Image (cartoon, helix red, strand yellow):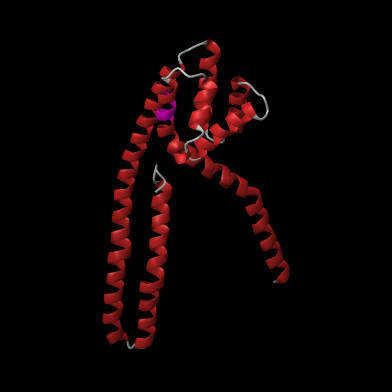
């Protein structure tokens, strides 16, 4: 038993250690993609003033509202100011670094637009509209999924719990089950099981939400 337990514990922490960075990267990518539609709008607004590209990222990096996107902009600015890289090399480095596919595509297209002499403000404006359309689609899907989740929650948990309490109360009078046992089961169901399931439901809804809230 001791050997088996030791092997299982070691295997558990080994798998956790291997996969933990993946969880962090996945969470960071989701955080970026939640704020990217709004960050894109702000970037296009700054770019419409025809400022140099490095100034666009420098101004954007001062706003904390966009979370990981702002942090990535700060890294781009830091690469230029602290390590002497130009805007092209800084963007290439950011493309290799970011875990979000959408941000990677945005930065790579921004780099291509700058190299070819295109209008950066026009590209960012069109790209931000595309991000917003995708965000609206995700919100529509989430609203549909949320209605299904609520139906399951109300039917299976709330109504199911009420039905179980009534059933056990009625059956205890016919089967001769000790009342203390029935009370304990009902107590566990109401004060422990339902709160735990409710917390799990909130986590599930939050994870499925495009806004993460």
Q: Is residue 105 above or below residue 62?
A: above
For the point 67% across and 63% down, which residue is it?
9
User: How far from the left and from the top, in percent, is residue 192?
Assistant: 41, 71
Q: Is residue 43 above or below residue 119?
A: below
Res. 127 visible in picture: no
Q: Name the side, left or right, on which 201 lies relative to 72.
A: left
For the point 61% across and 24% down, which residue is it?
92
For the point 62% across and 21% down, which residue is it?
86
Q: Is residue 76 above or below residue 179?
A: above
Res. 19 visible in picture: yes
In this view, the residue farthest toward the top is 117
In this view, the residue farthest toward the right is 3
Main SS, magenta residues: helix
Please tell me which residue lies in front, 2 or 23.
23
User: How far from the left and from the top, in percent, is residue 124?
Assistant: 43, 22
| Part of the protein shown in magenta | 40-44
Please tell me which residue lies in front, 136 or 68.
68
Q: Name the side, left or right, on which 93 lies relative to 29.
A: right
Q: How many marks?
A: 0
Please tell me which residue lies in front, 61 or 162.
61
Q: Is residue 176 above or below residue 151?
A: below
Task: Identify the image quadrant of residue 6.
Answer: bottom right
Tell me, yes or no, whether the highlighted magenta stretch contains residue 197. Answer: no
Q: Name the side, left or right, on which 110 lies relative to 191.
A: right
User: How far from the left and from the top, in percent, is residue 197?
Assistant: 40, 63
Q: Name the side, left or right, on which 87 lies relative to 172.
A: right
């Amino acid at each position: 038993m001791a050997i088996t337990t030791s092997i299982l514990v070691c295997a558990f922490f080994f798998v956790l250690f291997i996969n933990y960075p993946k969880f962090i990267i996945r969470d960071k990518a989701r955080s970026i993609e939640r704020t990217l539609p709004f960050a894109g709008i702000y970037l296009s607004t700054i770019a419409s003033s025809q400022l140099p590209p490095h100034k666009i990222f420098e101004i954007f990096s001062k706003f904390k509202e966009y979370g990981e996107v702002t942090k990535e902009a700060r890294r781009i600015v830091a690469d230029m100011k602290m390590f002497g890289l130009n805007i092209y090399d800084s963007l290439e480095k950011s493309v290799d670094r970011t875990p979000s596919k959408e941000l990677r595509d945005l930065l790579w297209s921004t780099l291509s637009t700058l190299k070819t002499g295109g209008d950066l403000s026009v590209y960012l404006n069109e790209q931000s509209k595309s991000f917003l359309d995708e965000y609206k689609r995700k919100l529509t899907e989430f609203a549909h999924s949320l209605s299904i989740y609520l139906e399951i929650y109300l039917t299976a948990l709330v109504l199911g719990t009420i039905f179980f309490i009534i059933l056990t109360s009625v059956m205890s009078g016919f089967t001769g089950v000790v009342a203390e046992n029935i009370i304990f089961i009902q107590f566990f169901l109401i004060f422990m099981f339902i709160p735990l399931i409710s917390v799990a439901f909130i986590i599930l809804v939050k994870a499925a939400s495009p806004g993460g809230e």
